[in-house]
Amino acid sequence: MEEVWNNNINQVNAESEVNAFFNSVFSYMFLALATSGFVSWYLASSGLFFKWFVNFETGGISPLFYVVMFSPLALVFFIQAKYQKYSLPTIIGLYILYSVLIGASLSSIFFVYSLGQLASTFLITAGAFGAMALLGYTTSVDLSKMGSLLYMVFIGIFLAAIVNFFLGSEPLAYLISIIGVFVFTGLTAWEMQKLKAVALDPAYQGEDRKKRSLIGGLMLYILFVNLFMSLLHLLGGRD
């Protein structure tokens, strides 16, 4: 009887730790989404986008915009490589900086799409993301092989998107968006399965566990933003 009681207590404690881990993961994710959304909206509505990112002499994009656009790539690699070395407050600071830069780089969408289009696409993204996250958390099927394949495809479409930024090919942009929807939803399920394994692993404790929840939130945030942009291009239309 005592053994059963102890097993029940251990199970409750394990479930509590898993819930706390995922609460932290999603708190970090929502923090980044809120930060990016506010920064993006503020730059567009205040006129700072044109002041900072448009060269009025040439009518083109200023060099600062390219810095803001590509610097998050270097920063996210730095965070993933160094998060175990630096303190949690430092990593949180870099994480917030990353979300600010992403928000700044996406501020132009307010000049292309209406608020209604942005809101409806956000809700669709949230629904698709939530469904795949739940699938990844609950499924007993090993998604590691699928995840590895999708990650390689993700790298491919990311490079293609950079090239197309300069080419401006609309058919290629649509193709990238269509592939992106499948890639980012699949990677969401894979990432959730990986995070569940971390949450259940007693080897991750203390600050290390907190840092891994932040990295988990970062990865889910990246997937959400990319899924949102893919769906926006496909469903949003243009003003």
Image (cartoon, rainbow, N blue to C red):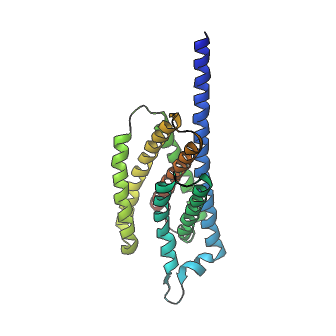
Residue at 37% of width from left, 51% of height from top? Answer: 151
Residue 163 occupies quadrant: bottom left
Q: Position of residue 224 (x, y in %)?
A: 51, 53
Q: Who is closer to the viewer here, 86 or 184?
A: 86
Q: Who is closer to the viewer here, 98 or 105?
A: 98
What is the tally of numbered marks visible in this picture? 0
Looking at the rendered image, the quarter that the N terminus falls into is top right
Q: Position of residue 217 (x, y in %)?
A: 55, 49
Q: Where is residue 88 in the image (x, y as percent from the top left)?
A: 60, 52
Is residue 192 visible to the viewer in this orientation of the structure? yes
Residue 149 relative to residue 227: left or right: left
Residue found at the very far top of the displayed protein: 1
Q: Who is closer to the viewer here, 73 or 230?
A: 73
Residue at 41% of width from left, 59% of height from top? Answer: 177
Residue 44 occupies quadrant: bottom right
Residue found at the very far bottom of the displayed protein: 57
Q: Is residue 103 above or below residue 208?
A: below
Q: Position of residue 220 (x, y in %)?
A: 51, 50
